[in-house]
Amino acid sequence: MFMTLTLLASACGNSNGNDSTGGSNNAGTGGTEGKAAPAKISIMTPLHMAETPDPKIEQLIEEKLNVDLDIQWIPASTFQDRMNAASATGSLTDIVNITITGANREAIRDGQFWDIASYIDQYENLKKLKPEVLNNTKVDGNLYALYQGRPLSRQGMIYRQDWAEKLGLSAPQTLDELYAMIEKFTNEDPDGNGQKDTLGLADRGDLASGAFKTVASWNGTPNEWGVLEGKLAPAFLFPSYKETMNFFKKLRENGYINSDFPVTSKTDQQNMISNGKAGVYIGCMCDVQQLYTGLSQVQPDAKLDVHNQVKGSSGEFTVFSGPGFNHPYLFPKSAIKSEEELKQVLAFMDGLMSPEIANLLYWGIEGEHYTVTGGKAVPVSDQAKIDRDVKPYNTIEVGDPATNGRLEGSYDYAPMQKAQDLFADNDSYVVSDPTLTLDSDTFTKHKDRLAQIITDATYNYMLGSLDEAGFDKEVERWKSEGGAQMIEEFNAAYEQSK
C-alpha cells in the first residue's frame, strides 16, 4: 500500500513559483471533486544509459503519487556542465542530483539550497533514513541532502572462471597470485585458439572507479587520506601507493594490461571482457551480470566468477569504503521559493520511499521486469530490457532496502547473487576516508585542480613517462600549489573533531 501523501493532496500549485494555496482548496482539480491537482515536481538527474527510458514508470509514479513530473535526463558525461549552466541562469529544478564537493559545497554555504534538518522528522519515511549516512552528507554540520543508499563497498574482481580452470588457477588470495593470473591469461592461450590474442587485465582511465584504487586498498593504501606519523596525509604519500603504481607499471611494461588504459572508456573496458578478449575486470562486482550478458552472446560456454578478498604485502585484506550513499538530492532555493513548496517536494520524496514506489524505481514493473519468489525480486533474463526501461530510474531512488522497504534481489545468475553476498562481506574490512566530514577551504576551492596534478603524475609514472624522482617532483608541486595548505587545514579540522 502507498502511504497517503497528505501534503501533496492538499497542495494545488507547483514548486516553480505558481500560487500554492494549500489547505482544502481543490481548485484546478479538473472536475474531480475532493482531489487536488497534481503537484508539479521537476528533477534534474544524470543518465548513465545511451537513451532516455520508456516513460511508463514515470507515468505510474505520477498516477500513484498524484504528481506531474518533469524529469530532465542529462547524459552523465555532460551533467556537471549542464548543472553549472542551469545554476548560472537560475534554471535549476526543484530536485537536483549533485555531489557535495567543490563549487557545489560553496553554493551550499552561500545559502543557495534549503537546510532540511528540521523537516525530516515530519515525514513517516524520510525519518527512517540512516543518521550515520545523513551525517556524511552534511556541510558545516547542517543537513541539505537526502540520499540513495549504497553498500559501503562493492569493490572486487570479475574474472574468466573457465580460463582459470583450464590453466589450473583458483581465485587469487594475494596480489602476487593476482599478477600470476593476469600474466597467464595473457601468455598461455586461455581461450585455446592457438593465438596470442588475449589480455590479462582490462582497465580504464579512472583511478577511483577503475582498478587502481581497489588494488591500492588491497595493498594497504588508505582511502584518500590516512594517518602518517601521527598526522593526516594524502594517500599518495604512503609507500603502498608507489608499490601499487609499480604493480600497474610492470603489468603495462609486460603487455598484460591494455596499454592505453589511462584513456580507455568504461564502455571500451567492458567490451574487452564482453568480446572475450580480456580475463580480469577490477571494480564494482555489480557489473558481472552486464558483462556476462554480452560475453554469452559471443562465447556461450564462457563462465565468469567474482571474488573480493585479495591480500597485499601486509597479509591482511582491506578495501576502501564509500560514504554509504550515491546520488545526493538537494533542493535549490532558486526553484523552491517558499517553505510550503519545500514541504510539498519533501512529501514527494517521502512518497518515493514507500516500498511500492521504491520497488518500481529499482526493479521496475512486477511481471514485466521482475517476479517475486521467496520474498525476493528476481529480474527477468532480458537484461537489455531492464537497462532500457528501469536502470535510469535507479538514480532517483531514496534510501535503501533497510529504510525504504524495497525487495532484496535474488538472481538466477549465480555470480550476480554471489556479488551481493560479497558486498556484505566487504563491510567487515572497509577503510573509510577520515576527511569525509572534515572541512578544508583549499580542498573546497581547488580540489579538482590539485587532484589533476596527482592523477597525471600517477598515470605518467605507470606509463613510464615519469620516474620516481619525477613523481616526487610532482608531489612537491602539488604541495606548493595548495596541497600543503590543504594538509594543514584538514589536520586542524581533524584535531578539532576529536
Image (cartoon, grey):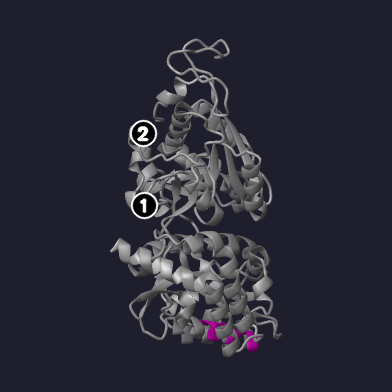
Residue in the image at 58% along x and 13% along y = 30
Q: Locate the N terminus by quadrant.
A: top left
State the image quarter where residue 31 is shown. top right
Disc 1 residue type?
Asn
Of residues 54 and 372, the one nearer the viewer is 54
Residue in the image at 62% along x and 47% along y = 83
Q: How far across and how far down the image is residue 173, in percent?
A: 42, 81
Say if the magenta span includes residue 287. Answer: no
Q: Is residue 282 left or right of residue 151?
A: right
Q: Locate the C terminus by quadrant.
A: bottom left
Residue 111 appears in the rendering: yes
Of residues 318 and 53, the one nearer the viewer is 318
Say if the magenta span includes residue 254. Answer: yes
Disc 2 residue type?
Tyr
Residue 161 appears in the rendering: no
User: Label 2 neighbourhood size at 10 Å, few (<14), some (14-19), many (20+)?
Assistant: some
Q: Is residue 320 above or below residue 383?
A: below
* Residue segment shown in magenta: 244-256
Q: How far across and how far down the image is residue 255, in percent?
A: 65, 86
Of residues 84 and 264, the one nearer the viewer is 84
- The first of marks 2 and 1 along the sequence is 2
State the image quarter where residue 480 is shown. bottom right
The residue identified by callout 1 is: 135
Q: Dominant secondary structure of the magenta stretch?
A: helix
Q: Is residue 107 above or below residue 3?
A: below
Q: Which mark is residue 123?
A: 2
State the image quarter where residue 250 is shown. bottom right
Give the secondary structure at mark 2.
loop
- Nearer the observer, disc 2 or disc 1? 1
Of residues 53 and 34, the one nearer the viewer is 34
Q: Residue furthest left?
A: 498
Q: How far across and how far down the image is residue 397, in percent?
A: 48, 44
